[in-house]
């Protein structure tokens, strides 16, 4: 099972490593042999980096100090809200995923069942 990052320069190796790790987690969770990090232009590219990063920091501030929450939220969103696949990807019990997502919803004061909220959080987590 492999996760592959986008092509990066040596200065970007930490970002490439993070991309590969997320791709690997997704490959494990979806039980496919290979997942590549996507490199096509996206809607998020329309927002200047500085503005997007400031918005992401403000939006995610309530959960930013707890890496387990942010990684669980990122993985859960990437797997379309699947408790089981998120649990597999993070090597935790599905109830742990449920508890962490409930904690994220409470701290963020957000309805994580709302697709607009999920989309905004996804864009923020990608920054």
Image: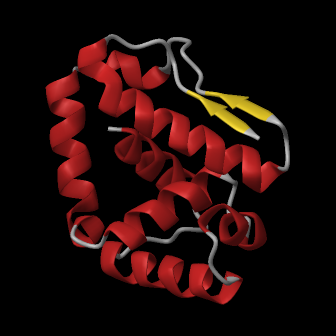
Residue drawn where x is 60% and y is 66% of the image: 90
Q: Does 61 sit left or right of 113 as displayed? A: left
Quarter of the C terminus within the rendering: top left
Residue 18 higher or lower than 79, as above or below? above
Along the horizontal axis of the image, is 50 left or right of 94?
Answer: left
Q: Quadrant of residue 93?
A: bottom right
Tell me where residue 9 sits by quadrant.
Answer: top left
* Place of residue 115 in the rendered image (x, y in percent of width and height, measured from the top left): 60, 54
Describe residue 24's horizontal placement relative to residue 101 as left or right. right
Tag count: 0
Q: Please state the horizontal and vertical placement of residue 63, each as a whole percent of the image.
A: 29, 70
Asked if 98 appears above or below 54 in the picture, the reply is: below
The quarter of the picture where the N terminus appears is top right
* Residue 125: x %, y % from top left: 39, 47
Residue at x 64%, y 43% (from the top left corner) = 24
What x and y, as percent, mark residue 25? 63, 50
Considering only vertical position in the picture, is 7 above or below 56?
A: above
Q: Residue at x 43, y 47 (%)?
A: 120
Front-lying residue, 23 or 51: 23
The residue under the point 42% across, 52% down is 121
Look at the image and name its color scheme.
secondary structure
């Amino acid at each position: 099972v492999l996760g592959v990052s986008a092509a990066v320069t040596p200065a970007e190796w930490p970002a490439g490593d993070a991309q590969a790790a997320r791709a690997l987690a997704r490959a494990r969770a979806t039980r496919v042999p290979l997942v590549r990090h996507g490199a096509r232009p996206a809607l998020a590219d329309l927002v200047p980096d500085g503005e997007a990063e400031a918005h992401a920091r403000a939006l995610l501030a309530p959960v930013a100090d707890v890496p387990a929450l942010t990684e669980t939220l990122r993985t859960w969103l990437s797997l379309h809200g699947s408790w089981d696949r998120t649990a597999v990807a993070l090597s935790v019990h599905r109830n742990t995923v449920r508890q962490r997502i409930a904690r994220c919803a409470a701290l963020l004061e957000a309805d994580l069942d709302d697709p607009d909220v999920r989309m905004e959080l996804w864009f923020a987590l990608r920054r």
